[in-house]
Amino acid sequence: PGVVGVMTIASDAYPDPTQFDPKSGHYDPKSSKDDPRWLLVDVDFDRKLERVITLKELKAHPGLKDFRLNMRGNRLSIFPVSKKHWNIVLGLEKAQGGSD
């Protein structure tokens, strides 16, 4: 796992319709249309990074110790990224990195 590209959020969050479909692999019987458990957003592709920035690199960088992705219990998902963290991640794109 790692950062491979840049995207822009293109919509507000809305209920993921697959959670309501029993034929879907993402069906969630505990979810309801009145109280959905899963939300999604539409995204626009901006660009592919010049190289993969690995999760190992992100976890090893001292400036990213409080980066949400590096915190225990977080998933690889969509979450806000501070300007400080964003600048570090983009800086890693140009740095010599190792592969996992």
Image (spheres, grey):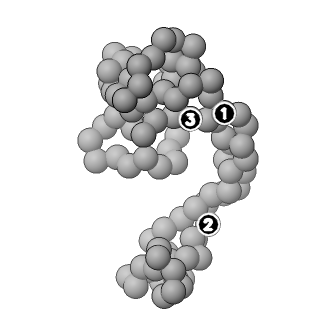
Which mark identifies residue 4? 3
| Cα distance in 3D space between marks 3 and 1 | 6 Å
**Residues under numbered marks 2 and 1 in contact, where contact means CB atoms less than 8 Å apart:** no
Q: Amino acid at mark 3?
A: Val
Q: Does label 2 or label 1 sit earlier along the sequence?
A: 2
Q: Amino acid at mark 2?
A: Tyr
Mark 2 Cα shell of 10 Å, populated few (<14), some (14-19), many (≥20) = few
Expressed as whole percent of the image width and height from the top left, the position of residue 42 reads 68, 56
Q: Which one is in front in this view, the residue at disc 2 or the one at disc 1?
A: 1
Expressed as whole percent of the image width and height from the top left, the position of residue 30 reads 38, 82
Mark 3 Cα shell of 10 Å, populated few (<14), some (14-19), many (≥20) = some
The residue singled out by tag 2 in the image is 14
Q: Look at the image and tell me whether residue 15 can be seen.
A: yes
The quadrant of the rendering that contains the C terminus is top left
Q: Does label 2 or label 3 sit earlier along the sequence?
A: 3
Q: Is residue 55 left or right of residue 72?
A: right
The residue singled out by tag 1 in the image is 48
Expressed as whole percent of the image width and height from the top left, the position of residue 81 reads 52, 34
| Cα distance in 3D space between marks 2 and 3 | 25 Å
The quadrant of the rendering that contains the N terminus is top left
Residue in the picture at 38% in, 49% down: 75
Q: Amino acid at mark 1?
A: Lys
Exactly how many numbered labels are in the figure? 3
